Image (cartoon, grey):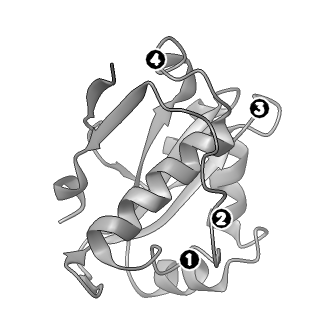
Amino acid sequence: MINEITIYFDSPKDFTPENIRPLNGIAGLYFIFSKSIDINYPFDVSKLLYIGMSEKKTNSIGSRLIGHYDGKSKNAGLSNYRKTEPLFFTYINFEMLRSVWGYKIEDLESYFLLDFVDKYGVYPICNNKTSAEILKNELITSFRINWEYFK
């Protein structure tokens, strides 16, 4: 039997170093999105720009987000959006899902990316992936992701 869990996102945080620093040492997924620019994806509109992950505490959500903030990640799309307007971010601490998700963080990121593609028609505009690893595992958990959060 598949266990369905609804994912709700925490309140948006301004994409600034002060808000990013407390996330050092936390592994999980993070989501960067625009305050006001609607992206016209093929199936729907969203402010979501990027879905990323930190697979270990040493390369934490905090360090990954700082890399995007200061441009060291070399994601030109995110750097250029940040130049034009303020961005927000939110995140999911992997520890919170460990009891219901028996696979790696990389698989969880793939799940979220593929679910976004299913609902919006393409990857988020600043994700440079051409294809995510399709899970070869048998899922016992299915997530209902609140993509409306990014509208």
Tell me if I can see residue 73 in this picture. yes
Q: Are marks 3 and 4 in contact (CB under 8 Å)?
A: no
**Which image quadrant is residue 69 in?**
bottom right
- Residue at the (37%, 63%) spot, across then down: 116
Residue 14 falls left or right of residue 94? left
Q: Which mark is residue 68?
A: 2
Badge 4 crowding class, 10 Å Cα cut-off, few under 14, some 14 to 19, many 20 or more, is few
Tell me if I can see residue 17 in this picture. no
Q: Position of residue 92 (x, y in %)?
A: 46, 35
Nearer to us of marks 4 and 1 is: 4
Read off the residue under disc 1.
78
Q: Earlier in the sequence, mark 3 or mark 4?
A: 3
Q: Amino acid at mark 1?
A: Leu
Of the 4 image quadrants, the one containing the N terminus is: top left
| Label 2, label 1: how far apart the Cα atoms are | 7 Å
Badge 2 crowding class, 10 Å Cα cut-off, few under 14, some 14 to 19, many 20 or more, is some
